Image (cartoon, rainbow, N blue to C red):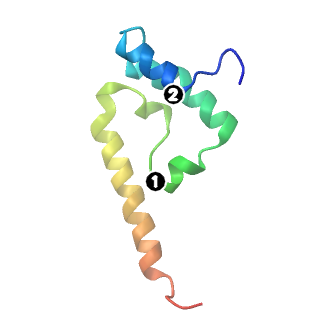
Amino acid sequence: MSKDEATVEKLVGMIERGELRLPEMQRRYLPPYIEKNGADAFKAQCIPIGARFLEVGTYKPFLTERRRAMVERLNTFLASPILP
């Protein structure tokens, strides 16, 4: 792990001490994490990762987009044959 990478424990400590606010953390650490590790874990949980969802005031649009992705995933599942 490089000096710039933060562990979850370190980030939680910074948040608890008031050194880092969640929106700032999202903007600072989420894009590099996704760039390094990919977005598969987020996509698997239907979590939107667009930059427009990284602000506190975008919670309702975040939920709307996540709901849309979940409906799409469920419809795809229900349309697929049960047995191969």
Residue plotted at (45% across, 66% down): 73
Give the quadrant of residue 34.
top right
Query: 57 or 5, which lies in front?
Result: 5
* Quadrant location, the N terminus: top right
Query: 33 or 27, which lies in front?
Result: 33
The image shows residue 20 at horizontal and vertical percentages of 42, 13
The residue furthest right is: 2
- Secondary structure of the residue carrying tag 1 is loop
- Residue 45 is labelled as 1
Q: CA distance from mark 2 to mark 1?
A: 20 Å
Residue plotted at (40% across, 69% down): 74
The residue furthest bottom is: 83
- Secondary structure of the residue carrying tag 2 is helix
Which amino acid, by three-letter code, is at mark 1? Answer: Gln
The residue identified by callout 2 is 8
Q: Is residue 78 left or right of residue 39?
A: left
Residue plotted at (49% across, 31% down): 51
Residue plotted at (37% across, 64% down): 71
Which callout, 2 or 1, points to the residue nearer the camera?
2
Give the quadrant of residue 14.
top left
